Image (cartoon, rainbow, N blue to C red):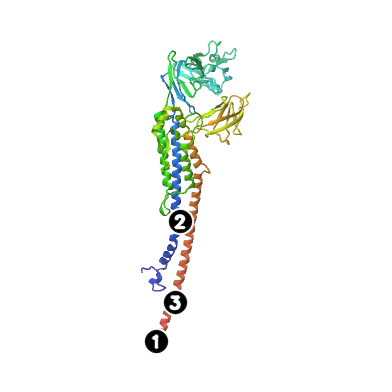
Amino acid sequence: MTTTSIGYALGIGSGLDIRTLVNDLASAAKAPREALITRREEANAAKLSALGEMSSAIDSFSKALSNLISGGTLHAQPSVSDGSILSASAIAGKRLGSLSAELEVVQLAKAQTIQSAAVASRSDPIGQGELTLTTSAGSFAITVDASNDSLDGLAQAINAQESGVKASVVVDTNGARLVLKGGSGAAEAFTLSAAEGTTSGLERFAYGPSVVGGMSLAQAAQNAIVRLDGVEVSRSTNSFSDLIEGVQIDLKKAMPGTIVSMGVTRPSAEITQGVNDFVAAYNEVMSMIAEATAFGVNGEGGPLRGDLGVREMQRQLRELPSKALVNQGTGPKTLAEIGVRTNRDGTLSVDAGKLEAVLASDPEGVEALFNPTQYSSHPDIVIKSAMGRVKPGVYTITDLVPASDGTPASGKIDGVAATGIGGNIVASSGSNAIGLILGVNAAVSSVTITVEAGLAGALKAVRDTLLGSGGPFASAKERLSDEADDIADDRIALETRSEKYYNQLLNTFTAMERQVSSFKATQSYLDQQIKMWTNDQG
C-alpha cells in the first residue's frame, strides 16, 4: 500500500495514510447523497427547459398566426379597374360582402393656399401691428412687434396659434414669400385681415374677398366630388371610409367622365394555404408536447410527464377545431365545419375537398373565421377602437349620454364608468374591455358590443390563459424555480455535513494515530528495559 503519512515514513504511529483514508471514507458517505441531488438538479433543469420550449412554442404559434392575419393576405380586398384614379382597401374588422359599384371622380379635395408678394429677405422688417386669422375653428390674433418683425417671425406667430393653418416661408430667385395653407375641404377656407387703417406694411399680408393689395390666392379650398353609381356625393378629404361599407377609398386624380368599376377579390388560395399552415404548426406543437410528456419504462420518459399545465395546454388546443370562432352570420363557425379534422393521435388534418367546397359556396363565411369583426347593436353607438385591441367577448354598455355644451360623453361598460373624451367614451384601465372606444351619438339606455375572436383571437386566448400571471405555466415555472432553490439549499447542507463528517473522521483518526504512537513509544521503552535486564542477568 502506498502511503504518505509522515508518521509512517518515520516508522512511528499506525503506518496508515490517515488523510487518504479519511478522504475515501468521507467521499464514500457523500457520494450517494450527491448523486441524488445531481439527479434532482438535472431533472429540474430539464423540466424548466421543456417548459420554456412549450411556452415559446405556443407564443410563437399565436404570434405567427396573428401576423399572418394582420398582414391582410387572408382578407378579401376591393378591386378597382383603374388604380391610377383611385385605390380601395378593406377596413380591418369589417366584412366585405358582394361588392359591385361604379365611381367617377369629378374633382379632388384641395386645401386653400395663399401667398404674399416677394420681399428681399425673410429676415427684413415687414411692419408691426395685429392681424386676425379667421378659420372654421374661430378667430386668432396674430401680433407682430419688434421681437418678431420679419417673415419668419410672422410665420412663427401664425403657427403658434395651432389654428389648422400652417405658415411657411418660401425663398427663390425673386425673394422670400409667406405661404399659408389650410386644411382640406371647402369648409376649411380662411381669411387674414388687418385692422382698419393699418399702414405699417403689415396690411400686405391680409387676405379676403374685400382685401385689395394683400396676399393672393394660389389654390382655392374645395371638396372632393365623386359619383357613386350616378349619385353625386362630396367629401372634405380625398381619403374616406364612409361611402361604401367596409371600404377605405383614396382618390388620386380627377377624371370626369371616366368610370372606375369596383368589385371584390376573395383570397381563396391564400386561405387554403393558411389553413394548411395552421394545421402544420398545430401538429408541430402537439408533437413537442407528446415528446415532453411521454411515459417510459422504469420511470423514464419526457421531463413534463404528468405536468398539469401541459395537460391543460393539450386540452385547450384540442378544443380549437370545434370552438366557435365567430357568432354573427349563417356561415361556418368552426374549423371542423371547413374540413379541419382531428385524428386519433390528437393531430389535425385537412379535408381538402370539403375546404374547397365550402370556399366555393361561402367564401365570405370561411374568411370570417380568420378575419373576425366587431359590431354594435345600436347604430348611434359607433365602435372606434381598432380590431384586435379589445379582448373578444360581448360587452353591455349602459347609461349612454352624448357630449353636450362642453360636457364629454358618458356611460358605463359592464357596469364600470367609462372615461369621456369629447363625443367618445373609453373603457377604464380596470375594465375587462380595456382598449374599447365608442362614439356616442345619442342617449341610449343599453347596447351590446360584440368583439369576435376569430382563429387568431381564440389561439391568443389559449396563450394568455396558459402564460398569463397566475396561469398554469406561470405557476409551474414558479414551482420549479422554488424547487431549484430547495435543491441548491440541499447541496449547501450536504457540503456542510460532509465537511463536518470529514473533520470528525480526521480528528478521530488523528487521535488514534497519537494513541498508537504513544503505545509504540511505550513498547519501545519496554523493549529497551527488557534487553537491559536480559543483558544484566547474562
Closest to the observer: 352 or 110?
352
Question: In whole angstroms, how far apart are the C-alphas of marks 3 and 2?
Answer: 44 Å
Residue 534 marker: 1
Q: Are marks 3 and 2 in contact (CB under 8 Å)?
A: no
Question: In whole angstroms, how far apart are the C-alphas of marks 3 and 1?
Answer: 22 Å
Closest to the observer: 219 or 474?
474
Residue 280, horizontal then vertical, whole percent = 40, 38
Closest to the observer: 8 or 189?
189
Closest to the observer: 118 or 260?
260
Based on the displayed image, in which of its 4 quarters is residue 525 positioned? Answer: bottom left
Residue 429, horizontal then vertical, whole percent = 57, 35
* Location of mark 3 (residue): 519
Left or right: 55 with respect to 411? left
Q: Earlier in the sequence, mark 3 or mark 2?
A: 2
Question: In whole angstroms, how far apart are the C-alphas of marks 1 and 2?
Answer: 65 Å
Residue 37 marker: 2
Q: Residues within 10 Å of mark 3 (few under 14, many from 20)?
A: some
Residue 316 visible here: yes
SS class, disc 2: helix
In what quadrant of the picture does the C terminus appear? bottom left
Based on the displayed image, in which of its 4 quarters is residue 277 positioned? Answer: top left
Residue 309, horizontal then vertical, whole percent = 49, 45
Q: Earlier in the sequence, mark 1 or mark 2?
A: 2
In the image as oriented, which residue stretches furthest toward the bottom? 537
Q: Amino acid at mark 3?
A: Phe
